[in-house]
Image (tube, rainbow, N blue to C red):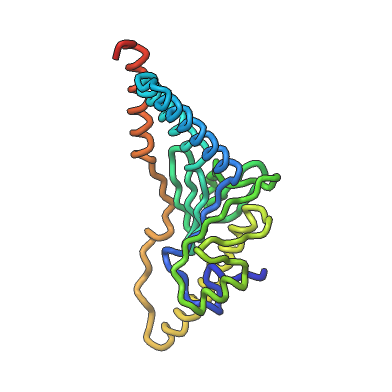
Amino acid sequence: MNVRAGFGDSASPSPTADDRMVLRSTSSVWIFVVLSAFLAFLVGDAVLRGAVSFALGASPWILLAIWSAYMLLLRPCVVVQPAGLTIVNIVRTHRVPWARVTDLTSRFQLTVHIDNGRRITSWGAPSIGTDRPSVASAYSRRDADQQSMRASGVRRRNVRAIPSLPTSRLIERARDAWELRELSREGADVAATVATGPAAPQPAEAARVSTRIATVPVAIGVILVALCALQVLSPGW
C-alpha cells in the first residue's frame, strides 16, 4: 500500500507527538456555527431593542443550547496521531495505540476494533456517505518535510487538503505509516542487539487503551442545567 508523506514515511524525518490530523463531520461544524450565530443574534437584538432583562433571563437557556450543540456536533471527532488514535465522543475520550488496533470499519459510523474484542464507535467521524471529513492538521516539521507534505496535498497554515476518501481509508494510511516505522525500528533493534546485546524491555504502558471522562464540559453542562432549573422553579429569580 502506497503511504504518502505526512505521517512519517521513510523519506521524511520521524514524526513528533504534535503531528496530528483531526477528523470531524463538516456538516456538524457548519450546523454548530450557524446555530451559535443565530442564538447570539437573538441575544444581541434583544439588547439593542432595550429588552435587557429578557436577554439576561434567556441567557442560561441560550448557553445551554450552545453547550448541547457543542457536545453533540463539535466536540466528537477522531484525532489521528503517529502513535495511535484518539476517539473523542460526547462524554468519553478513548486513546487507542496502533498496536492494539485490529480492524477499522466505517459505514454509518467509524468503529475501531481492538485486539481484546472490544469495539469503540466514534460519534463524530464522517461516514462513507456524502458528508466529507473536515481535516485540520497541526504539524511541526522541518522545511524539507514541508516540501514533501505540500507535494501530497498539504496547504499552508497547516491545513491539509484531503481528497474525498472514506474516514477509515485516511486512518488506514496513518496506520500503514506506523507499521513501516515499526518495521524500521525492529530492524534497527536487531542490528543493535547483534552489536551490543539485548536491550531493556519496553514498558507496556504505551500499548494501553485508556478512557477518560470529559470532566470540565460535563461540569459546565450541569451548572447550566441547574441555572435553567432554578429559573423555572423560581420565576422571580
Across and down, in percent, residue 41 comes to: 48, 31
Q: Report the residue at 56% width, 68% height from top.
A: 177
Q: Can residue 63 be seen in this view?
A: yes
Q: Name the spot of residue 19 as percent of width and height, x first.
A: 47, 64
Q: Where is residue 135 in the image (x, y as percent from the top left)?
A: 56, 55
- If the image is split into quadrants, where does the C terminus sit? top left
Residue 157, compared with residue 218, is above or below; it is below
Residue lying at 51% horizontally and 32% vertically, measured from the top left: 38
Residue 100 visible in the displayed image: no
Depth check: give the residue in front, 161 or 79: 161
Residue at (51% x, 76% y) in the render:
145
Up-down: is 15 above or below 33? below
Given residues 201 and 104, the one toward you in this image is 104
Instruction: Specify the farthest residue to the right.
Output: 130
Vertical arrangement, residue 101 with respect to residue 66, above or below: below
Tell me residue 10's x, y (percent). Answer: 55, 78
Q: In the picture, which quadrant includes the N terminus?
A: bottom right
Left or right of 229? Residue 80 is right
| Residue 29 falls in image quadrant | top right
